[in-house]
Image (spheres, grey):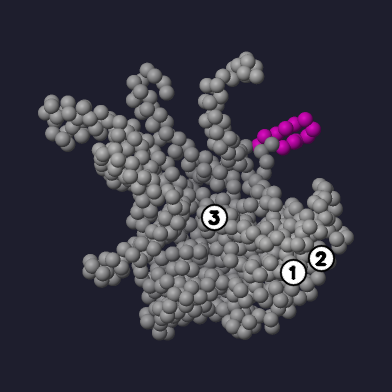
Amino acid sequence: MTARLKRLGLRGRNLVTAVPYLWLIVFFLIPFAIVLKISFSTTQIAMPPYEPLLHWAGEKMLQIQLNLANFAFLVQDDLYGTAYLNSIWVAGVSTLICLLIGYPIAYAIARSSPSTRNILMLLVVLPFWTSFLLRVYAWIGILKNNGLLNNFLLWIGVIDQPFQMLQTDFAVYVGIVYSYLPFMILPLYANLEKLDLTLLEAAEDLGCRPWQAFYKVTLPLSKPGIIAGCLLVFIPAVGEFVIPSLLGDPGMLMIGKVLWTEFFNNRDWPVASAVAIALLLFLVIPIMFYQRAQDAEAGGGVHR
Amino acid sequence: MSISIRAGLVGLLAATALAGCGKKQEAPPAAETAGAPAATAPASTEEKVVNVYNWSDYIDPKTLEQFTAETGIKVNYDVFDSNEVLETKLLAGNTGYDVVVPSASFLERQIKAGVFRKLDRSKIPNWDKLDAEVLQRVALHDPGNEHSVNFMWGTTGIGYNEGKVKAIDPNAPVDSFRMVFDPAVAAKFKDCGISVLDAPSEIVGVALAYLGKDPNSQAEADLKLAEDLLMKVRPYIRMIHSSNYIDALANGEICVAVGWSGDILQARDRAAEAGPGNVIKYSVPKEGTIIWFDMFAIPADAPHPDNAHTFIDFMNRPEMAAANSDFINYANGNSASFEKISEEVRSDPGIFPSAEVKAKLFPDLAESAEFTRLLNRSWTRFTTGK
């Protein structure tokens, strides 16, 4: 058996590396191909609600019909461009806030004693034990006019009228930053924890003040962690639908909502698929940048 | 009748496990062969199972238990909470469901897409109990009532917090769409909070009715008129959502909502349970509004169509229809059940409007694909305020 597998080039190592490839093919490439296919189709009232790409014309003629109008449509109406830019803006600002909050937390955890470190890390991932949706709903209870935060502010006398926080952009940022902060902290912690402290000692010996040592040594060395954390926050935040829908102002136009409207309200699966493909292309570009940064980090010679 | 998000998917998992039934052993073995004609004999060869997909919190569980006890057919009961989720599943096909409950305006398109099978009325003896007016109104969506039977129906109207509204304006026109469509009135309730459904076709429809136009008009000029009206009041609207308003209305976060009758009555009950602080009322606007219908229908690829007919017929027994109306506070389309419904539900004008009010109700008919796109584009301009 083993010999036969070997003859086919299937050694143990190949089999193991095949698993992630198989995963990607089944759960990413095939769904992507289906969405891509639908994005070139035309909508119709039927099951499924789009026309097939391939059809027989005559006896031995198999025709393929690609409808490019769906992509052209995205450019013609400024709705889609505005929604993409808005989503990128919201995701970008949220990522920045996550970084500003997450970095000190990750740094503090990495510098604490090993026993407290585990407890602190547990606390960071603890929210994942409850449903994401439930945690967003909890924010409604905190931010609403008759909610925890407003009642607290009224009680201490900072305000004398409830302050409208729910259904504002502020609430969306709170929701996104809260939900995705652990994704920023985890890679940063993994990176900072490995930092060689003797490098900081050397910097101080050479006359660096602590903040200079941080700026010149710690920060550059933690760059891979920063990039990984930022991507993990930015990418899901761009397509975020639940948080703006539950907490945000209905006027906040994000691409997730546009996709919803195309798919469910217009029942136009082809245009909805085109929106999704375009969004994916928007997201692949930052990943390519990340890949390049990783390669540069690895010394340029070794390709990972 | 609500659009929801991931919550809907959570709901899908909530299948009811019904107590097993002694009669089950007597059931003939599953002998379904592909392409076999629908059983004509009264004794069906189907496996004793029916897969039902209905709105969440939309049935009296006792009626399901009784159905199984009498027929020996086990009910696999799944729930959804948005027409969109149901429609997507139906259009993708192979749902495995035998009975589904879309709203009539959605059903109308789904029939055209070939989603449903025609009903065999010989298997629904309780057909003669159905309300003639409801049948006639539903026929606008389902020509000839060939594909569906009404389960429950309701209206799209105004829910309001009586205390808060009267405190701001004792003469507020709570029985009129002026509450939200008249900028001078809506402006007063801006800080108190106004919510409208995220349902473009319905809100544009009632806006057109308010303007004295045909609510189902597909003319671009009319759409523009409705959009102008909506744009003028947009600054005063805080929430555009189809399910969040229930809690928000119940706990006083907002004080005026354009919503579905059943949802607002639910908000009323929740507010009453919470204490005397917020009193929620529902009114059917005098300009006339939408009457909507949630319909039983059988998918064309249903694995147990005979059991599906049996289920639909059972739920249309007057006793069962009345039990469900009592349990969920909705009006049903079964006229024989009316006197069996409790006095409290029967005499509630929010549930059973007077004949005079009913005369002004109009359907929300399905639009063409082209007009739907214009409508939703206009709706996005409204929601974003630009």
Q: In the image shown, does B189 or B59 lie closer to the viewer?
A: B59
Q: Is residue A60 magenta?
A: yes
> Looking at the image, which residue is at 35% across and 54% down?
A174
Structural crowding at the residue carrying mark 2, measured as other residues with C-alpha within 10 Å and reported as few (<14), some (14–19) or many (≥20): some
The image's mark for residue B10 is 3
The vertical placement of B153 against A225, above or below, is: below
Label 3, secondary structure: give it.
helix
Of marks 3 and 2, the one in the foreground: 3
Local SS, label 2 = helix
- Quadrant containing the N terminus of chain A in the rendered view: top right
Q: Amino acid at mark 3?
A: Val
Query: Which residue is at a point 73% across and 62% down the rendered structure image?
Result: B21
> Mark 1 sits on what residue?
B314
Give the position of the C terminus of chain A as an image quadrant. top left
Judging by the rendered image, the residue that carries numbered circle 2 is B123
User: Label 1 lies in what chain?
Assistant: B
Kindly identify the amino acid type of the residue bearing the numbered disc 2: Lys
Residue B290 vs residue A155, the one in the foreground = A155
Q: Which residues are magenta?
A: A55-65
Q: Is residue B15 above or below residue A302?
A: below
Q: Is mark 3 in CB contact (under 8 Å) with mark 1?
A: no
- Image coordinates of residue A186 in percent, x first then y, are 36, 40
The label number, if any, that marks residue B108 in the structure image: none
Give the left or right position of residue A12, taking residue A153 as reference.
right
